[in-house]
Amino acid sequence: MFTKVMVKRIYILIVMMLVSVFGIAQMGNNQNQIEIKGSVMGKENRTPIAQVQVSTDRGNYTFTNSLGEFKIKASLGDVLIFESPEFETVRHRITSNEDVDVLVEGYSDRRSSQRIKKESISERNSLADHQRFLDSANLYKKTDLEKSIDFIAQSIEPLGSSGNKTELAKSLSALGEIYMYHEQYDLAITNFKDALAARESNKTKLLLGQVYVLNGDFQKGEEMLLPLVDVKNMVPYQRVELFEALGDANKGMSKLRDAQEYYQQGLVIAEKNQISPKVIDLSSKMGAAFASENRSIEAEGFYQNSLSLSKKVAPERMIQESEKVADFYNQKSRYDDEIQLRKQSLSELNQLPRPSAPVEGRGVSRADTITSQRINYKIANAYIAQEKLDEAIPYLEKSIVEADKEDDLVVQKDATRKLSEVYRNKGDYTKALETYQDYVAVVDSLYVRKEQEISQAARFSREIANTQNRISSLEQERELNQSKYSLAVTEQQLYEETSKRQKWIIYSLIFGIALMAFTAFLYYRSNKQQKLANNLLALKSLRTQMNPHFIFNALNSVNNYIAKSDERSANRFLSEFSVLMRSVLENSEQDFISLTQELELLELYVKLEHSRFQDKFDYKIKVDDKVDVDAFQIPPMLLQPYIENAIWHGLRYKEEKGFLHIKVDQLTNDMLEITIEDNGIGRKKSAAIKTANQRKQKSKGMGNIKKRIQILNDMYKNRVEVSISDLNEDQTGTKVSLKLKKK
């Protein structure tokens, strides 16, 4: 008689066998790959043909360089596919490791003769320089963001007035890939769109769809990717990437069944063409999709398949897949299985060679990097979930030591806090206190580090913006040079044929004027877009300044409790403060958030301040029943500085207990008024009691707010209006009135 557990295990085994059938077979065929070299040239004059896509029927692909040469990994029996707009697709089956030279008949007559007529020697040299700089940009793509972008700019410069849209599209598409790798998704989208505007390409469309998905715009990603499903000449690897991206987009939109279907289609193609990395990726994603539907048996089958295949690829990949499966076990409360798997991952990770020193230049910092300190921390959490506190302590201590050694303050902070909680739960309050003090010290260091990172990020953003502006200027200059070149040719033709073609002279002049007007329009629009981009950068900079200012002001309250040794109040305050900070940081990248979110943040902030100054003021937040708060949006952190001023400069110095009143009233259908009133000592008396040092300093928060309102009103046509006045005739109390339009 089979038990339910035995039936479940048999079902898991069947699923794993079905999923692994193709995957295991395809892994063995990748061991005998050889490097195939060759070239693509015109048959008549041996003219090199650059940027020909060379791919195999198994998914590997590359492009010919400026000399028409290529290198690609393949196996005996594979089919090489040569694709280019310049000639019909060519296929060649590999029977040995000899070089493969493709000669395109008629290419030199059709193409080179046109170049001889239209291009000078210097222009041909410029195209060679363009390809050379483009190759250099791809070389530094993953190791040095600034250097790769600079090479892209240099690749555009030689194009000049040649008007070669194909080369321009290649440069812009390569720039988009660089930004995409370094997670600058907005810039990647802009450059992919510009590349498509210069020349349409299925590869660029696929990249644009992928970056939409990575940026969280799943609807646009799906709209861009769906038409590519019907494209016939797409190589297998790209088609696998297409279905994978469509699966990611549908998963992001919570369409789990559709996501599973797309993943399954990609998995079939990857298994058929023996594309090992994608078989592992898609198996893992199928497991995640089933796990999201609580279909644990199917999920575990796919996860085990991805783990089994990864063991045959590389230790790093096996560790990566092991951690995914361990996370799945954690979600299902299978802590023993999780701990066993993570210990295996830790053992494998410790056997890997230490990474070499990073290449100079800016790389990319991945938040999901698998490190021994992170694995130790997760093992400890699994033990804690089982209430095995003694077993958890050594792993927490290892995590703290390794995080300190690797300068990983985030893991060090989390592990130190968790260790303090474990000691407290065990009743060892002395060690709990000591560990908590270590935690506070790490938090302080982390805040300093974050402030430095914010400053560096702002400076780096300016550098990227300057380089991007340079590239845009080069494109504008190229368009202007192309216009001048076309006009010069037109004028020469008109001069030679004046006597015969008077009518064509008039038409050409009209064409020239229209072209100049169109060029001027493009220049005007570009300047307008540049102004908008500058405003957005300024807003981002101001928001970046606002967050540290708010954090440090709020931390004063925490410091007060710590100074008084009021641990319970400090813990409660820190808990509420963490909720507030999480919401503030989540909204910090947006120009506007809903009024509901802003009021929730304000209520939590006032509550925190009231807990410190209970003897100084009471407060009330009243929203008129007629107000539809969900219909209005407001810049984040706009009201907080006014409330902060009311408490710290008005109510705090009042001898008797004061009152803070926040009201939201509907003025019209499209406008509401937010009023902040306090019966404090007033602005005049507050200014009088300031110290000499305080008079020299300007309110950073208020100055920041004024600049933000000015920029937002300039961008959105006077959407926000703020006025400040005395509440009473004797200049006591303060009233802040903020009027907000709906659109």
Image (cartoon, helix red, strand yellow):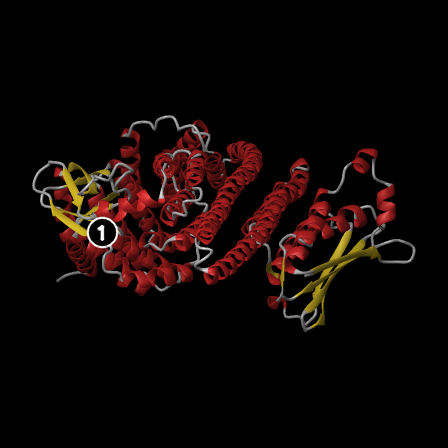
Check the image and name the residue furthest to the left: 95
The one nearer the camera, 455 or 735, is 455
Give how far across and how far down residue 607 sits, in percent: 67, 53
Question: Percent position (x, y) of residue 547?
Answer: 61, 44
Q: Residue tagged by mark 1? A: 87
Is 258 placed left or right of 456 in the picture?
Answer: left
Q: Is residue 388 visible?
A: no
Tag 1's secondary structure?
strand
Q: Which quadrant would the C terminus be assigned to in this image?
A: bottom right
Residue 248 shows up from this direction: yes
Between 44 and 349, the one lying in front of the other is 44
Is 341 or 636 nearer to us in this picture?
636
Query: Label 1 sits on what residue type?
Result: Phe
Residue that extends furthest to the front in the rendered view of this protein: 499
**Would you call the spot at circle 1 few (<14 residues within 10 Å), some (14-19), or many (20 or more)?**
few
Residue 80 point in image, percent of width and height: 16, 46
**For residue 338, which quarter of the picture?**
top left
